[in-house]
Amino acid sequence: MSSDDGDMENQAELEEKTRLTNQVLELQHTLEDLSARVDAVKEENLKLKSENQVLGQYIENLMSASSVFQTTDTKSKRK
């Protein structure tokens, strides 16, 4: 094996290591971005759940305050 063959092999290994290192760094950044997005979605989900509960309670209160939604016993009113 000549010196040139060894140099070419080392160069190829170095290029492969550099490519893999860059790929790992890119994947790390992608993972960080996805993790941040998951955290933001979780936070938004909690906020919406809380708003849903408030709206549900509000609707329940409106329905209980309105005579339209009150249950009536038709038999007792006829007598």
Image: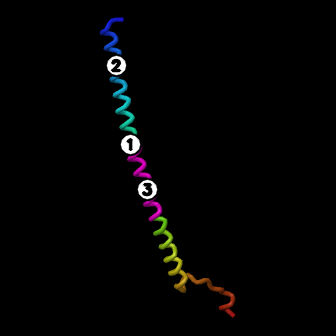
Q: Is residue 11 magenta?
A: no
Residue 18, position as x, y percentages in the image? 34, 28
The residue indicated by pointer 1 is 30
- How is the rendered protein coloured? rainbow
Residue 59's disc is: none
Q: Residue at x 41, y 56 (%)?
A: 40
> Which circle, 3 or 2, is nearer the viewer?
2
Three-letter code, disc 1: Thr
Q: Separation of disc 3 and disc 2 at Cα?
A: 43 Å
Give the camera-side residue of 79 and 3. 3
79 left or right of 44 in image = right
Query: Which sits in the foreground, 2 or 78?
Result: 2
Question: In the figure, residue 48 lies in which quadrant?
Answer: bottom left
Magenta extent: 31-47
**Earlier along the polypeptide chain: callout 3 or callout 2?**
2
Give me the C-alpha separation between circle 1 and circle 2: 27 Å
How far apart marks 1 and 3 lie (CA) works out to 16 Å
Residue pointed to by mark 2: 12
Residue to which mark 3 is pinned = 41
Magenta stretch contains residue 35: yes
